[in-house]
Amino acid sequence: MSNRVLILYAHPSTHRSEINRPLFEASCQVNHVTAVDLYAEYPSFRIDIDLEQQRLRDHDVICFMFPLYWYSTPAILKEWQDLVLEYGFAYGADGRELTGKKFICVLSAGGAESAYQASGLNRFTLPELLQPLEQTANLTGMTYLPPYALFGARTAKEDGKLSDHVLEWLLWLGEFSKPDFNFDALRQYDLLKLARDHVMEVTP
């Protein structure tokens, strides 16, 4: 049986999105993928906890798709985490519903990769900034995968990076759906480097 992928997309100004929206729309066309636009579904932030928890139960790979805003997720993704990942469901003595699932962040960063270094403007690398999400995955028993990211998102479209970025993501989605895909091997790879170099020859 194929792995089912759940994409939770969050962009507060989706009509202005040049990177994340095309990724989301392309993802909607892929088999075994359920793609949810959280801002469209919950414009007043009244998140249906039971529905979201059932979505999590029904999928094998959980993906947060978002632009990096102030070194974190857009607000609705934080609200979603606070409400949906309840004690007794996602963690705690009886909270094992997410154990064994895979988790990945698919995101864009406006600045260049050089800005996300100890010596750069933002002082921390992207994996360091994502550590709260990595720890959330660890606490809930999910396997944390390297992020799939695009730096320099503000000019990516003009720089001709968008089409390759979308194509590479669709290739990864196809791999994720394979029942025998080796997610543990994927943890050894630097998806940031693969995305940056537009290299897809190395496939776990």
Image: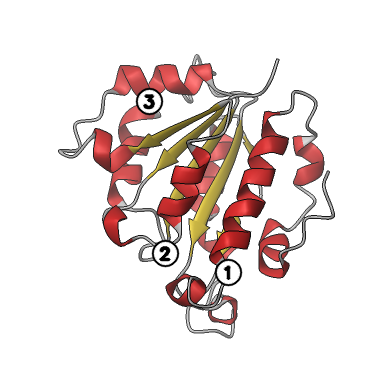
Residue drawn at 82 percent across, 42 percent down: 185
Q: Nearer the viewer, residue 78 or 191?
A: 191
Which residue is labeled 1 in the image?
161
Could you say whether the residue bearing mark 2 is in a helix, strand or loop?
Answer: loop
Q: Nearer the viewer, mark 2 or mark 3?
A: 2
Q: Amino acid at mark 1?
A: Lys
Of label 2 and label 3, which has the lower sequence position? 2
Residue 86 at x, y percent in the picture: 38, 25
Q: Are marks 2 and 3 in contact (CB under 8 Å)?
A: no
* Alpha carbon separation for disc pair 2 and 3: 24 Å
Indicate whether 149 appears above or below 80. Answer: below
Residue 131 location, quadrant: bottom right
Residue type marked 2? Tyr
Where residue 88 appears, as percent x and y from the top left, is 43, 18
Circle 3 residues within 10 Å: few <14, some 14–19, many ≥20: some
Judge from the rendering whether residue 141 lies leftward or rightward of residue 48; answer left or right: right
Q: Quadrant of the C terminus?
A: top right
- x 42%, y 61%: residue: 68
Q: What is the x, y in percent for residue 100?
A: 65, 25
Asked whether the viewer can see residue 89, the reply is: no
